[in-house]
Amino acid sequence: MAIRKIIFFGHAITVFVTFIFSELKMAKTASDSEFEKFPIVGVGASAGGLDSFQKFLKAVPANSGMAYILVQHLSPTHHSILPGILSKATSIPVQEISNDCTIKPDHIYVIPENQMLEISDYSLKLTPRKKNVQNMPVDVFFSALARVHGTMAIGVVLSGTASDGTVGLKEIKEHGGITFAEDPNSATWDGMPKNAIGAGVVDFVLPVEQIPTKLVNVYALYESDPVKDEEQKSKINENSLRKILSVLQQHSGVDFSFYKRPTVLRRLDRRMAINQITEQKDYLAFLIKNRAERESLFQDLLIKVTSFFRDPEIFDELVKTVIPQILKNQDPQEPVRIWIPACCTGEEAYSLAIVLFDALGGLTSGHNFLKTKIQIFASDISDVAIKKARTGVYSAAEVEPLSKSQLADYFTKVDANYQVVKPIRDSIVFATHNFLKDPPFSKVNLVSCRNVFIYLDPFLQRKALSTFHYALKEKGFLLLGKSETIGMPSDQFIPFSQEGKIYIRKSGSSRFQILASPSTMNETPNKLPIPSIRASRTDFKKSAESVLVSRYTPASVIVDGHMEVVHINGSVAPFLEPSSGKPTHELMKMARKELAFELRNALHKAKETQESVIKEGIPIVDNGHRSLATIEIVPLTNVVDPYFLILFQKKSQNASLLERAWKKLKPTFSSKERNFTEQRVMALERELEQMREDMRSISEEQEAYSEELQSANEELLSSNEEMQSLNEELETSKEELQSTNEELIVVNRELLEKQNEQNRTLNYLDAVIANLREPFVVLENDYKIRTANAAYYKRFDVDETEIRGRSFFDIQDKIWNNVKLQTMIKKVLPKAIRIVDEEIIINHPSSGEWRFMFNAREIVHNHESNKLILLSMEDVTERKIAKS
């Protein structure tokens, strides 16, 4: 009975649990269907936005399957009636956003006044608008939309002033979304769309009425996740994809084969959607014919997400720990050197420069000292990005992360933008450079390569780490992105800060490998990994293969191009053994001395011919037993870096045909002949052994010299790369100087023309003045005579030298020292008055009374502080006598 009860209760529990799981599954299915992925369109506008919103919504189809979120600059104190106005322009439901508002397709949502908008999954969240700061609601929402919805995000910028929306569109584009801007010619205010177009972050520029139709057509072809399951992976046309990447490599010189597959396919699908092409083979044909599209695809595949002081907490840690340690360990005679690979448009480089300048006392500590103290190399494979970085000009939206003090100290206002000051720009060398292929910079204190590894597969990550290890000084620092690591425990770097993703270079030598030149357009790259579909039925085959490999294949090692052992299979003890001293993986130091010479020669031949090389019958001695060794060198194919498989085999030293013949002949020799022959054989064997030893020594010396030459060559290549970068920077500076010189030439010509015009005017005035019959004088502000005209000298019979520079009231026996005249003249400058036809009687000692009509006025010479008085006098004595 008890057993039946237990069985009954067990069955009941099973039924209950099954019911609960069924309900949970149904709930999850319902939830998934409720929030099935659909595109979300962010529409931003400012001044003139109402008219653009209405035109946009009138063109939106009722069943587009998309949600539309409208963000406009609204007055924080005035209640918005925008939803009511816009609802009259469309049949689609329009509602004002409330906190935690759920987004549904074919609905329109409008931001309320005095709020900023964020998005979390399919829910909208409102936050209070900040006071006393520049609010960028469109940028804030677009950036959040890009981060949360990635390829399903669409950004549309309509009429408005200033630059809000540009940074947000950049984020959307970098996360794989599509961007639109209203045609500036049709916009009420063209500031926002024109700024976004100028920044190169807009895919389509259309009149506002045409945007919805284009949007629907594009997204009909665009998938959110091109590699979301194994079944879809198997459908990818590998041949077309490889050819596309080959065409792109021929165009740009960059091989994207080892970039992470989801990133490549996502950007490829994005370009296909923009061009409304459904098949990769059709897109390949379009790509081959269209150079502009090749450049667009290349730019889309590049990593261009950056900003000033991105992740401020990382810079705080750099300021507190890394920079002080670099400066502490730095030789005062040597500059601090920093390298920023994949610098994009330069914000990261300028941020690090500002940090270093602050650490060294800022700009006030002397430009020349700072310029020699800091050398920053910033490189990128995009010419477009490098050109912008060199100018150092950024929009108001781009410099928003900077503090007011940083903006005031290190930037100058240029029209509506901001330019980095010259001392900072002079400390940075920007260069077009592929750090995965080109020789790296050397002897640097810090490498900052952030948010690049997330786009590279493990092979390229390892290659990049080797390059950075070579570039850094002893105990130099490597900075990676927040979501990046150096992978497995490394023999190149040790963690310095796990949270900050900062690493320190381990000691040890390192090298970089120069890759071969890019393939031609007709070649099909075979480096892209082909996805395989796993099946459990093949496991027994793999198991059998592993047994065969472990038990029946000869002992072997794999070495790289530098003869470093990277993998060992089986027991290699009879052929290789650890050398005394510091552990090493160098093949030549591990090889037994009997094998070293033959091994080196065989490897050299395999490198030269790229064919398998076999050496047989090499005598070796292992624990007193003599045997013969066979080595086979097999170059590995379908790899970027050179690798070689070395197979070892050993067999007992059986009596050879010659030895058997010697035994038969031995009895026929006399004792004396036998002794002589045996001694001769032993001498020849010793001589052969000595020759082998001598050849091994010579080969080792040659190898050492080769190592030194290789190191010197690598240093020369790095120096050459640095000099080339400096040369590019100088070329750019030269072009800027030539441009400035041309502008100065134009200005100089204008000034010369102006001067000639003034000279002509002056000559004209001199001629006029020379013909004036009335005398006049020019007085300075202390009433000393600066000049007078010819009529004055003739009328009063005086010479220029007698009166020039003397007080007007003291010349000519002080005839002008008249109280009324003096009072009148002294009022001209302080009160800026004009004297017109003022009659004054002058008493002349010999001629009696003179009657003069005086006119006086202020004239300004050169600048405000140097004022003069023009005083003219007309003798009316005879006229007055005649009237009387």
Image: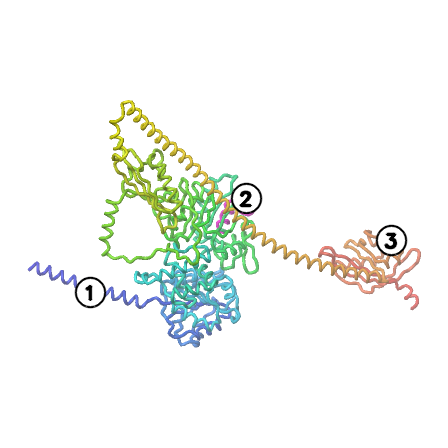
Residue at the disc numbered 3: 799
Element type where label 3 sits in the image: loop
Counting the numbered discs, the total is 3
Residue at the disc numbered 1: 19
In magenta stretch: residue 795:
no
Q: Residues within 10 Å of mark 1 (few under 14, many from 20)?
A: few
Q: What is the x, y in percent for residue 655? A: 25, 34
Nearer-the-camera pick, 290 or 258: 290
Q: Quick check: marks 2 and 1 in contact, CB under 8 Å? A: no
Q: What is the x, y in percent for residue 164? A: 48, 63
Residue at the disc numbered 2: 372
For marks 1 and 3 on the same chain, the one whose residue lies earlier in the sequence: 1
Cα distance, mark 3 to mark 2?
A: 63 Å
Q: Give the range drawn in magenta.
A: 350-369
Q: Which amino acid does label 2 sit on?
A: Thr
Nearer-the-camera pick, 527 or 128: 527
User: Which residue is depicted at the point 48% across and 45% down?
Assistant: 718
Cα distance, mark 1 to mark 3?
A: 125 Å
Nearer-the-camera pick, 611 or 4: 611
Q: What residue type is labelled 3?
A: Asp
Element type where label 2 sits in the image: helix
User: Which residue is depicted at the point 13% across and 60% down?
Assistant: 10
- Drawn side of residue 678 relative to residue 711, left or right: left
